[in-house]
Image (tube, rainbow, N blue to C red):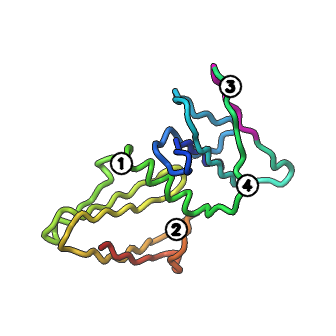
Amino acid sequence: MVKLMVVAVDHNMKMQKFHGGLYDKGRDLEIDGIFAEGDYLIYCEIEWEQDACREFGISIYAEMNALLTEIRASIDQRSIIEDLIKTYLVTNCDKKGISDYTHLGDGKIKRYVDYVFGYLVFYYKNDSSINVLEEKIRMNSLYGLEILPPHRDSFEFEITIK
């Protein structure tokens, strides 16, 4: 399985705009689009299903020259994934996956649940000035899923949204 995401970044590597993403078993994946001059982060995560060959390539086809630079630094992969998904959600949050908490007397707390490029995402937003949300989510079954730290139980997590 391959996860591939492209996002525009500023010179401080702060994510600005999500341009595309894929999650597929395919060998030849393509993110097509018109990309303005600037810096982009290409995130690629490969779940190797064999040991014989562990090489991959990224190609860019463009009218102008493009320079690819590999970032070799100790990067917190989890925070990059979180930032990528948040950047995606800013413009692609579909209203069908949004629940609000009007039963609390204030509909300014919202939860968005979706499957985004191979990740099951629970995204909470609290614009309420009076309510705090405490919620426990329990999964009946998790086939091929794992709840990531800081949560310890792989079937359940608790959150507090202030």
Query: Which amino acid does the dot numbered 4 rest on?
Result: Arg
* C-alpha separation, residue under disc 1 versus residue under disc 4: 32 Å
Foreground: disc 1 or disc 4: 4
Residue drawn at (49%, 56%) of the image: 83
* C-alpha separation, residue under disc 2 versus residue under disc 1: 24 Å
Location of mark 3 (residue): 65
Q: Nearer the viewer, residue 40 or 93?
A: 40
Q: Secondary structure at mark 4?
A: loop
Location of mark 1 (residue): 93
Location of mark 2 (residue): 142
Q: Secondary structure at mark 3?
A: loop
Location of mark 4 (residue): 72
Q: Secondary structure at mark 1?
A: loop
Residue drawn at (32%, 72%) of the image: 161
Most prominent secondary structure in the magenta stretch? loop
* C-alpha separation, residue under disc 4 versus residue under disc 2: 34 Å
Query: Which amino acid does the dot numbered 3 rest on?
Result: Asn
Q: Point out the image quarter for the C terminus.
A: bottom left
Q: Earlier in the sequence, mark 4 or mark 2?
A: 4
* C-alpha separation, residue under disc 3 versus residue under disc 1: 33 Å
Residue drawn at (40%, 62%) of the image: 122
Q: Earlier in the sequence, mark 1 or mark 4?
A: 4
Foreground: disc 3 or disc 1: 3
Most distant residue in the bottom direction: 152
Foreground: disc 2 or disc 1: 1
Bounds of the magenta segment: 57-63
Total labels: the figure holds: 4
Q: Are marks 2 and 1 in contact (CB under 8 Å)?
A: no
